[in-house]
Amino acid sequence: MREDYEAASFAAANHVALSPLSFLKRAEQVFANRPATTCDGVTHDWAETGRRCRAVAAALAARGVARGDTVSVLAPNGPEVFELHFAVPLLGAVLNTINTRLDAETVAYILDHSDAVLVIVDASLAPLLEKAFALLGRKLPVLDLAAYETLTSHTPMGWVLPADEGQALALNYTSGTSGKPKGVIYHHRGAYLMAMGTVAGWSIPPNPTYLSVVPMFHCNGWNHPWAMAVVGGHLIFVREATPANLLAAIARHGVTHFGAAPIVLQMLCDQAQQPFSPPVKVLTAGAPPPPSVLEKATALGMEVMQVYGLTETYGHISQCLWQEEWEDLPAAARADRQAQQGVPFPMVEDIRVIDRSTGRDVPKDGLTQGEIAIRGNTVMKGYYKDASATAEAFEGGWFWSGDAAVVHPDGYIQIRDRLKDVIISGGENISSVEVEAVLYRHQAVQAAAVVARPHSRWGESPCAFVELREGAAVSEAEIIAFCRERIAHFKAPKTVIFGDLPKTATGKIQKYILRQAARELGEQS
């Protein structure tokens, strides 16, 4: 009877709060003797890693850390930061991994805004923390990472899942590409589903060897630390993450998987002496990758999948899922397809590209732009202490990304720009991403960004900021001519500025700084 179906309800036997803590609890048993982490020649298996995480949780509790407290971490990737991804949530506390390349003023802002009760810091970053304290006007309790091993000697606590899977797990701050960073709240349910969706969407097999390249302060390393516990992965850490050291680690440990921003891929491609054998599976995100970089990576034996996401969505929520019919395309055409942002990951309920003026989905013509809107369990709980910004981001029951995109006839999404980065010249929309892709094809260009500069006749014109490869030389006229040979003349830069580009720690170019610089150049005639 229908009444019997409706009377049935969840109970202790059939409902457990979803939390990534469950993955480590299982890994400690199922993958007990398999390697979990390796760094500086020291390897811990999953049984030892689980014990260490539970011991660190007990030690933090003894220091007074309690449920709902924020524990900030200022340290580069390493086994300790990986273990804190389980130890801190095990207490019901909230992990706040801070961007290690931020200035002292921003670090001070995050420590204050996050209500941190403890800061765990690597010795190399202690001077930065002291400057932040001076600006903050007060000190917080500090634990030097060098003393971390003493925490692992405590009697381990047992496994405790949150009573509420919506409980806060992590607090991540946006990258600051457009000004003051916002605190993004992750919950246990979202992290659990993101890890499971990553395993399914990336087709990760049991026991991969994963090179930790994505900073764990960025979307908790794209949630890969939790995903690796699902499959009993072996995480390889390199203290000095230079391209040469990363390449050496790939060869030495037989790395099978890693994630990296396009700028990191480009540096690896520039230094690699021979193709990887067997191929290495790579996720790339953070900015639309130039097709030229994807071409080089493929030639070197990297099986690259472009993914798309934001801090507010726990990282990647769409993937450029490879289609067999692309195999027969020329290399450049394949790379163009790979540069698309693609289709939703399995754990994402829906991604739409909407014309906000009408509220309707844009046609699948690859031309009409709209804004990417996302709905699903891997959307943030909200912005910490910012109800108005949360309400604006969640207007109409969707998370509005701020990214302008088109939808191709096959349903694949492709980003054209951040909405604020679209250049409107003489009534025509110019995608800065499209122009940047052309610039990256020039052999002298290491990095490039295009923004709008005021123009007396056209309103705005493309202004290119170009960072050259070491030892390279090229003129403004040569760059402009190069672009005009490959795209419509009105899309080509009318101004080219050479120099180092301001970047976040995740490789994103800080366009808000460049937009201001372009405005200061004055109106072009």
Image: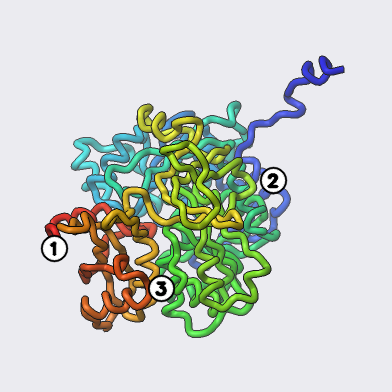
Which amino acid lies under the numbered mark 3 shown in the image of this protein? Met
Which mark identifies residue 418? none
Going from N to C along the chain, the mark reached first, 2 or 1, is 2
Frontmost of labels 3 and 1 is 1
Which amino acid lies under the numbered mark 2 shown in the image of this protein? Arg
Q: Is residue 276 visible?
A: yes
**Dot 1 surroundings within 10 Å: few (below 14), some, or many (20 or more)?**
few
Quadrant that contains the C terminus: bottom left
Frontmost of labels 3 and 2 is 3
Q: Residue 211 at x, y = what percent?
A: 53, 64
Q: Circle 2 — which element?
A: helix
366 w.r.t. 136: above or below: below
Q: Residue 410 at x, y = what percent?
A: 61, 57
Which mark identifies residue 26? 2
Residue at (50%, 62%) from the top-left corner? 284
Frontmost of labels 2 and 1 is 1
Which mark identifies residue 525? 1
Find disc 3 in the rendering and name its residue: 267
Which of 357 and 265 lies nearest the eye of the viewer? 357
Which of 298 and 350 lies nearest the eye of the viewer? 350
Which amino acid lies under the numbered mark 1 shown in the image of this protein? Ser
Which of 405 and 456 lies nearest the eye of the viewer? 456
Query: Where on the picture, by quarter, is residue 132?
Result: top left
Q: Residue 7 at x, y = what percent?
A: 78, 16
505 w.r.t. 254: above or below: above
294 w.r.t. 417: above or below: below
Which of 92 and 7 lies nearest the eye of the viewer? 7
Q: Is residue 66 visible?
A: no
Residue at (13%, 58%) from the top-left corner? 523
Q: Residue 363 at x, y = what percent?
A: 53, 49
